[in-house]
Amino acid sequence: MDSQAVTFEKQSAPLSKQELVERISRALPQDGYVEALPGLVLFRSSIADKTVFSVMEPAFCVIAQGSKEIQVGGEVLRYDPGHYLITTVGLPTVGRIVEASKDRPYLGLRLYLDPTLVTSFTLESGIETRKGDSTARAMNVKPIENSLLDAVVRMVRLLDRPNDVKALMPLVVKEIIFRLLLEGQGARLRHLAAEQDHSRRISRAIKEVRENISQPLNIEDIARRLGMSVSGFHHQFKSVTSMSPIQFQKQLRLQEARRLMLGEDLDAASAGVRVGYDDPSYFNREYKKHFGSPPRKHIANLRSNL
């Protein structure tokens, strides 16, 4: 790229970021979130330090204003308008908005990464990915390049052009995937692909754990079915998720129990049994350790804030 083009890109980046702020603010004038386009969710918050526990699905996330921390396992990732976050498997996370105020609210977006689309487009693109890199973390934060930011802005512009969404949204999403591949995210995106490499095996294991959340976790059986050694499975699983299989299942169980108590009005003992805890006292201890309060108190606090 010649010096004139580099200068233009440096000058255009602040304008793109400002446009993103303005368009998200206009689409979401109050705190909250909305699925503004298929697979695209916008977020706004004027309050910092609010902690959110969730299972984060495969997604590409950009912040227009403010900053945020995501904890996965023992790792904490922070990103801001100069960085994006990508995750390619469903992981239990703890999110916290770090910078936000009424004058400068946190503004962000999340684009769902459809596994079928990512897989087919990765093959169509002809961009080679590193098949041997099976230890790539599923979640990553990286500086956002101007070309990728430009594609994001063009996607958000479609909010004002509803008649163009059906034709142009798929094209912009493919361009975003293309930019991510060019930026070296291919190994990560392979977690969504269909090849039977180690990273794909771990994705299958994650799916199995999530679908059988209340069942005891038999590491030896899972490793054998995947054609891996127990030690190799442990290593690969933790490399991808930042958690051991047991830690991963525990966080999934506790978050599902929280959902059952909050959304289906189950009591703590019933929710614990539903997700695999036969001992109510042990469930209460584990819940308090993870969420900071015993189940009944925590759910009461959540309901008071709704």
Image: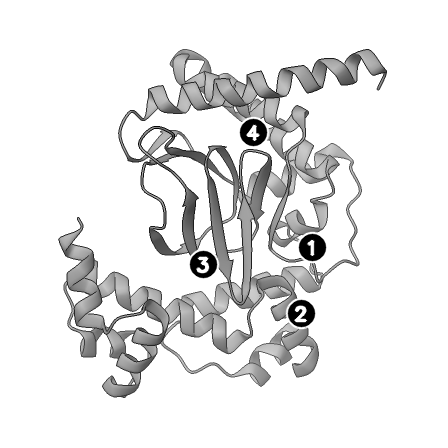
Q: Residue at position x 48%, y 22% from top?
A: 20
Q: Is residue 36 visible?
A: yes
Q: What's the amino acid at mark 2?
A: Gln
Q: Earlier in the sequence, mark 1 or mark 2?
A: 1
Q: CA distance from mark 3 to mark 1?
A: 26 Å
Residue 69, given in percent of the width and then of the height, sits at 48, 51
**Residue matched to label 3:** 93
Of callouts 3 and 2, which one flags the residue occurring earlier in the amino acid sequence?
Answer: 3
Closer to the eye: label 1 or 4: 4
Residue where numbered disc 2 is placed: 236
Mark 1–mark 4 Cα distance, whole angstroms, equals 22 Å
Which tag, 3 or 1, sits closer to the chain's start? 3
Asked if marks 3 and 1 touch (Cβ < 8 Å), the reply is no
Report the quarter where the N terminus lies.
Answer: top right
Q: Residue at x 38, y 38 (%)?
A: 100
Q: What is the CA distance from the residue labelled 4 to the residue labelled 3? A: 25 Å
Q: Are marks 1 and 4 in contact (CB under 8 Å)?
A: no
Q: Please state the total of marks drawn on the protein image.
A: 4
One can see residue 264 in this view: no
Q: Residues within 10 Å of mark 2 (few under 14, many from 20)?
A: many
Left or right: where 4 falls relative to 124: right
**Residue under pointer 4:** 173
* 1 and 2 marks in contact (CB < 8 Å): no
Q: Amino acid at mark 3?
A: Thr
Image spot of residue 133 (x, y percent): 76, 58
- Mark 4 residue element: helix
Which disc, if any, is residue 178? none
The reply to whether dot 4 and dot 3 touch (C-beta < 8 Å) is: no
C-alpha span from label 1 to label 2: 16 Å
Q: Nearer the viewer, mark 3 or mark 2?
A: 3
